[in-house]
Each structure stands twice: as structure tokens, then as C-alpha cells.
Amino acid sequence: MAIKKQKELDIEEKSPENRILSFPDEVLERVLVFVKTHKDRSAVSLVCRDWYNAERWSRTHVFIGNCYSVSPEMVARRFPNIRSVTLKGKPRFSDFNLVPPNWGSDIHPWLVVFASAYPFLEELRLKRMTVTDESLDFLARSFPEFKALSLVSCDGFSTDGLASITTYCRNLTELDIQESGIEDLGGSWLNFPESFTSLEALNFANLHSEVNFDALERLVARCKSLKVLKVNKHVMLEQLRRLLVRAPQLTELGTGPFSQDHKLRSHIDLESAFSNCKNLNTLSGLWEVSSMYLPALFPACTNLTFLNLSYTALQSAELAKLLQKCPLLRRLWVLDTVEDKGLEAVASSCHLLQELRVFPADPFEQEVIMEGGGNGVTESGFVAVSEGCPNLHYVLYFCHQMTNAAVATVVRNCPNFTHFRLCIMDMRRPDYLTNEPMDEAFGAVVKTCSKLRRLAVSGLLTDRAFEYIGTYAKNLETLSVAFAGSSDRGMQCVLEGCPKLRKLEIRDCPFGNAALLSGLERYESMRSLWMSACNLTMNGCQLLARKMPRLNVEVIKEDESDDMHAEKVYVYRSVAGPRRDAPPFVLTL
């Protein structure tokens, strides 16, 4: 057993009392099998020396929320039997182009260490990491038992790198490419051997070029355990029908465009293919939906729990017809083209809904929505959903206008929010009816929603809003702030009052050195702090670095002529010390 092996390697003197209190190895090993989450595993390791060692030897999966918080060598020394790794790289604000290219987070040094320490590695899940074709080729050739690769919001690689994975990973069960900056060199990457049959999940929805459809069709036909298939917009309706005929066992499907295809012989054939997919619970894709073909989906909607329409500019009438066929829906993502009438349809049809995300069809649109203007969603749709969906606990809502009263109504109707992300796209916009700041709206959120873990604030906000957050948001873990606040006091209230805060993301706010330095006692218990376009100076950042030597304080200097201001600051705890791969524009203080 792993723990017995550990005992041989970690011999230490024990008092009679310790021997009496120790669990037998077999009991402890059986208990740890049921401890799954990384938070719980970490807590177990803190109980005592025996439990630390038992957890160390029995852990097979490790989650690392910041690739610079620890070195790969440290991970390998601590956990000798890892089979699965989840690793995150760049700060989240890199999604908004706030992190310059070539900033770092290269996966290759990790792979080199893993090849020596974990030749039995089976699974790698990366987010916001830089992954080159060379790294993918190294991965494919170094781990003979490798099974699952997920690349979310990664960059640096091309379809040639994917070709290495499909060629050499003979036991692959999952290949998942989501929202990644991939150089698309064509469809020849889909070159799985003809004897290959183990695939269970394939997602290439964000690739831009055509794939070899004949190879894809043969692959789908061979892989009888395939449950997840998400294709790109070059897979047309007739091709989709053929894939569904060969894989009726799918549980998750991402389609191509759902519009006219002259090769499709009959709507009935497409509807028949969908009706045979009895186990489908997730549906996405649906680019360019035509109302003519939408009814073909209806037979497959009965058991849907997740419907992702975030690439589909559906109108309210089309959405209403579709949602009437989805009685079990728990998660819904839509574009704001559905307008308030579409959200009213959500309220009337989706009473079990738990998560709603409304994205802007045009994120750069600055036009203010006027009442009755018919452009996007407003507070009216938000309130309607809260009245019809009492189980709602996760919301991401992009809009141009909002009121304090509407938000208060929403949280009163749905007091169990754990994630509340309201993005008023017009910067510093007040309550459009009263012209008052939006302070009371977010005050209502944190007062009412005691389980709140993630909050994103927007609109015109004074320090009053942050006083509310510091006073009431005792379970808050992640806070995102943009274009808000009056003074340093706002940030100080958050740092002083939110004991569980782990990530604080701030941009374009008036917070300066005093606000930054008010968190000296908090930063080591947090994962990271990001501040950009605030009122920070190099002197303030240097003072933080001197007072907290165990933190990495990094300043991104894109303007070499300005030696005084710190435009972008990234602070994070690390047991590995300053990183060794920082580019010239990243100053580690």
C-alpha cells in the first residue's frame, strides 16, 4: 500500500501517546479515498505529521491556482504519485487584453519536471497558460499513459501541436480546446490512428478552419464511449446529422451553424437524428440559427440541463419557443439580443434555473438603452427572471442601465446567490431613474446574500458601496472592481472586512498607495491582487515588497519613460520566490 511504503520512507520516533492516537494505515488510506476536493485534501494534511504523510502519498490530483506560486520541483517533492494536474497561469484580466504578450506562464518547465517525476501522468488541465507546439509534442511523447488534455484560454500553439497529441497519445479519452488563441493551420490534425477507439470527449469548437470530415465521422463511429462532441462552425447540418446517427449516446453536443444546408435532404431526417439522442443534457454552438431549422432541436430538449446560446443571436420569440421544450434547464447562457421579452420567457419556462449568464452581442457598444428602445436587456428582464426562477444562485448580467430598486428586488427574490456579477457597460453610470450612485444596489446584495462568494461591481459607486461589502460580505472570496470608488477608503474597507477574500481584481479606480499598504496583513492569505490604471507609485510598491518579502510584487512597465507610476501591479504569494522567466517589462520588486 502507498501509506505503508510511506512509513518505510518517513520513519520517526513516536511517543506512546501518539501511537495510541494514530489511525491504522489501512483505515486512514480508506478514509482519504473519499476526500476529493483540493481544499479538503489540504486541510487533511494539516492535522498531524501522520496525516500529512498519508495525504502526500495518496494524492493523485493537484490543483495549482497560480503557476508562479510554487515551482514544479516543489510539487514533485511533495506529491510523488500525481496522475492529474490542473494549472492556471496568467491573471484573469488577461482575458481583457490587460496582460501584454509574452508575459510568461510557459508550461514547458513543468512538463520537463513531470516527465521525470510523473512518467505515469494521465491528465493535464491548463487555463491561461502559454503552450507551444514543441511542448505539446514533448507531452505526447513523454507520457505513454496520457489520457486527457484540456486547454482553456491558452495561447502559443497551433493545430500542428494538436496533431502530435492525436498521433502519439494512444490512450486519449479527452481533447478539449476552449477559447484558446490557436494558430489554425488546417484540418489534418485530426489524424487519430484507425485502431483508436478510446475517445470520450472532443471539443474543437473554436477552431476556424474545416476539419477532415471523413476522418471525424470515422472517429465518431469507432468511439462507442464518446459522450461529449463539440464541433466548429464548418460542420454543416447534414454532416451534423450523420454524426448524430453514429453517436446517439452523446450527453453533450456543440453544433455548427444551424442554418440552411442544401445537402440536408429533409428537416425530418435531422429531427429524427436528434430524437434518438435520449441522453443529451448539454447543448451549445448553434451559430447562425435559422427559425426554419430550430424545431429539429425540440425532441432533444426534454432532458437538457445546460443550454449555451452565447454564440447565437436569438430573438425573443425564437428563445421562447425553444425554452418551452426545456423543462429541466438549470443553466442558461444567452446574448442580450433576446431582450427583456426573452428573459420573461426564461421566467415563465425555466423554474428550475440556477445559473444565468447574459453576454453582450456587441461588447463595444456604448449606446445607452432607453426605455422601450429595444436594444439589449434592462433591469426589467433581470427582475422578471428573479420572480420566475427562485433557485437562481449564479448570475452574470451585462446591461447598459440598472436601478438600485431592481437589484434589491432581484436579491430579495433570490437570496441564495453565491455568484453575483453585474456589469453595467456604461462606465460610472448611476441609477438611471434617480441619478443616485449604485451603492444601495450592491449593499442589498451583500446584506441579503450571506452565501456570496464572488462579486463583480459596476456603475457609479462611492466608498459607501465598499463599506457595505466590508461589513456584510463575510464569505466573499473573489471581488472584481472597475471604474468605481471615491478614495483609498473603499479598498481599505474590503481588505479589513472580508476575512475569506482570496482574489481581488481592480482596474481604473482611484485607489493609491495607502489602499495598497492597508492590506499588509491580508495578502499572504490571498491568492493574488491585481491593480491596473489606479493611483499607485513605484515607491508604494517597493515599500510593500520590503515589508512583505514572501510576496512577489510585480510591476508591468510598458511605458519606460515613466519611472514614477506603477501602471499594472500583480501581487501574489509564492513559496518559490521571484520567478526566473520574467520578461524585461516585468519588474519584480
Image (cartoon, rainbow, N blue to C red):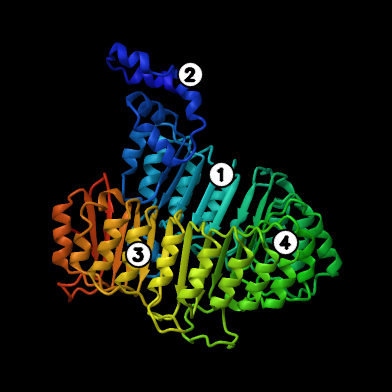
Front tag of 3 and 4: 3
Relative to residue 508, is residue 205 drawn left or right?
right
- How far apart are labels 3 and 4 at the CA level? 38 Å
- Which of the two labelled residues, at mark 2 and mark 3, occupies the earlier sequence position? 2
From the image, tell me which residue sits under label 2. 26
In the image, what residue type sits under mark 1?
Cys
- Which of the two labelled residues, at mark 2 and mark 1, occupies the earlier sequence position? 2
Q: Residues within 10 Å of mark 1 (few under 14, many from 20)?
A: many
Q: Residue furthest top?
A: 16
Dot label at residue 169: 1
From the image, tell me which residue sits under label 4. 326
In the image, what residue type sits under mark 2?
Glu
- How far apart are labels 2 and 1 at the CA level? 35 Å
**In this picture, is 388 found above or below 170?**
below
Give the image location of residue 281, x and y in percent. Answer: 69, 54
Q: How many marks?
A: 4
Front tag of 2 and 3: 3
From the image, tell me which residue sits under label 3. 468
Which quadrant of the view contains residue 6? top left
Give the image location of residue 11, x and y in percent. Answer: 31, 17
- Which of the two labelled residues, at mark 3 and mark 4, occupies the earlier sequence position? 4
The local secondary structure at tag 3 comes to helix
Q: Which residue is pictured at 69% across the width and 66% down the height?
A: 235
Front tag of 4 and 1: 4
- How far apart are labels 4 and 1 at the CA level? 38 Å
Decide: marks 2, 3 in contact (CB < 8 A)?
no
